[in-house]
Image (cartoon, rainbow, N blue to C red):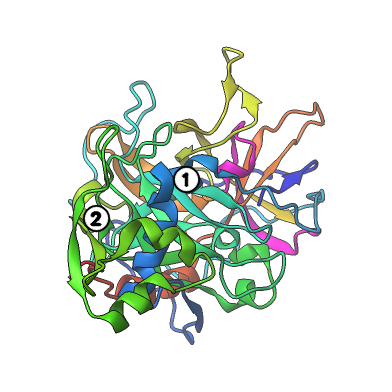
């Protein structure tokens, strides 16, 4: 989903510092997150993996940026109070995997994070699509953050998008750290139920990774003998179970086998995980990292979404009547194309450790000066309610599907 907004007001921003320690938000009833099962069993996750790995990753390579237009297409002009838009407690942070970032946080020498990647899924059109996403700190090192509309189907109001996987470091179709099947998704019920873009964010737990095939080679793993009942379960699961034919076989002697993928380990162990910052004041610089597409960079080269891109700027408060969003952050950024959805906004980013604090996720873009060029990205404001939902997602275990 790609939201293109023509008008946006960027009020005066007030700078502030990240909280130096984890701070609980002000005492209030924690929101009930909307939780959805993406792949609720090892068999279901296995079938999802076969869908993307089948036919030399044909579905991965055929995926296009998620570009379903929403009903609202404009961001309205208007006044907004200076200061944090809707902070509900003291500012706080969760440290990234590896601890507090160290080293330079300027943008003179950009070393992009290993945590950024693409999420792939089936759209309402039944075709494969992708958004941007990032690995996040969590108890079991298995958490991904992205835009809510890259998980929940706002087009048809289905519970969640199907065949959902995360591929960190995706580069021109490569899977350097493997493929991670989504297990559970968590978001605010005001997005899941009412589609309010103030809450357009999602946290997704993923199973251990499945190793990518070597260049020109087969998917790592081995054939494992199973019973006839198990074989039938694996080979007939889901609407797209026909793709599993390459990963199941029946011997004429009456023996049955399924392909046991090689386990690549936990996401956070392989690529790390960014920290989280919430209840922050506007005015902080953030590094925005994602996979935008459909525009030309400063050199005039076409941006196709095959590789990571970045932009850098200070956040400011913004709002939109058309999107029913009164608490947004904005940052100067030329990202456009559906692939930019879910791009990570990293505050306090260190180019030495390649870590920082997630303080935004691109959910919409805007042309603020009416020159027919996108110049601004928009994110929901990260408040204490987001932190509460993050905490519930960050405590969920997923594990391996190969055991």
The answer to whether residue 92 shows anywhere in this view is no
The residue at the far bottom in this view is: 29
Q: Position of residue 64 (x, y in %)?
A: 59, 42
**Is residue 143 or residue 208 the one in the foreground?**
208
Q: Is residue 311 above or below residue 326?
A: above
Label 1 close to label 2 by CB (< 8 Å):
no
Q: Position of residue 247 (x, y in %)?
A: 32, 59
Q: Position of residue 237 (x, y in %)?
A: 44, 74
Spatial CA distance of label 1 from label 2 is: 22 Å
Residue 210 left/right relative to 370: left
Q: Residue at x 44, y 65 (%)?
A: 203
Mark 1 burial class by Cα count in 10 Å: few <14, some 14-19, many 20+: many
Q: Position of residue 109 (x, y in %)?
A: 33, 22
Residue 191 left/right relative to 55: right
Residue 322 in magenta?
yes
Residue 219 left/right relative to 367: left
The answer to whether residue 163 shows anywhere in this view is yes
Q: Residue at x 52, y 43 (%)?
A: 283
Which mark identifies residue 268? 2
**Is residue 186 or residue 257 the one in the foreground?**
257
Q: Which residues are magenta?
A: 321-341
Residue 127 in magenta?
no
Mark 2 burial class by Cα count in 10 Å: few <14, some 14-19, many 20+: many
Can you say which quadrant of the picture contains the C terminus? bottom left
Dot 2: element: helix
Q: Which label sits in the foreground, 1 or 2?
A: 1
Q: Residue at x 56, y 70 (%)?
A: 160
Residue at label 1?
60
């Amino acid at each position: 989903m790609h939201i293109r907004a023509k008008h946006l007001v960027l009020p005066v921003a007030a700078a502030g510092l990240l909280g130096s320690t984890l701070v609980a938000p002000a005492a209030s009833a924690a929101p009930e997150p909307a939780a959805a099962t993406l792949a609720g069993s090892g068999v279901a996750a296995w079938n999802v993996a076969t869908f993307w790995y089948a036919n030399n990753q044909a579905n991965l390579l055929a995926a296009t940026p998620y570009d379903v237009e929403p009903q609202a297409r404009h961001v309205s002009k208007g006044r907004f109070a200076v200061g944090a838009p809707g902070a509900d407690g003291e500012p706080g942070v969760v440290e990234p995997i590896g601890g507090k970032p160290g080293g330079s946080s300027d943008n003179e020498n950009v070393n992009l994070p290993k945590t950024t990647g693409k999420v792939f899924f089936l759209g309402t059109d039944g075709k494969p699509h992708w958004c941007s996403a990032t690995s996040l700190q969590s108890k079991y090192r298995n958490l991904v953050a992205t835009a809510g509309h890259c998980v929940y189907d706002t087009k048809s109001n289905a519970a969640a998008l199907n065949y959902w996987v995360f591929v960190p470091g995706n580069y021109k179709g490569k899977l350097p750290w493997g493929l991670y099947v989504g297990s559970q998704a968590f978001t605010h019920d005001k997005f899941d139920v009412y589609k309010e873009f103030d809450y357009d964010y999602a946290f997704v737990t993923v199973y251990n990774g499945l190793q990518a095939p070597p260049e020109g080679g087969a998917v790592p793993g081995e054939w494992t003998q199973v019973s006839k009942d198990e074989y039938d379960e694996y080979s007939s699961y889901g609407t797209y179970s026909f793709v599993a034919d390459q990963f199941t076989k029946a011997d004429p002697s009456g023996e049955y086998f399924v392909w046991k993928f090689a386990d690549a380990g936990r996401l956070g162990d392989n690529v790390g995980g960014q920290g989280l910052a919430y209840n922050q004041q506007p005015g902080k610089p953030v590094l925005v990292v994602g996979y935008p597409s459909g525009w030309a960079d400063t050199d005039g080269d076409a941006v196709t979404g095959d590789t990571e891109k970045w932009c850098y700027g200070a956040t400011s408060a913004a709002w939109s009547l058309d999107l029913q969003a009164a608490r947004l952050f904005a940052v100067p950024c030329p990202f456009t194309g559906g692939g930019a959805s879910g791009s990570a906004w990293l505050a306090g980013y260190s180019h030495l450790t390649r870590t920082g604090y997630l303080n935004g996720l691109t959910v919409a873009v805007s042309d603020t000066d009416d020159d027919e060029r996108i110049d601004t990205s928009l994110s929901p404001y990260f408040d204490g309610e987001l932190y509460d939902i993050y905490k519930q997602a960050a405590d969920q275990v997923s594990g391996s599907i190969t055991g």
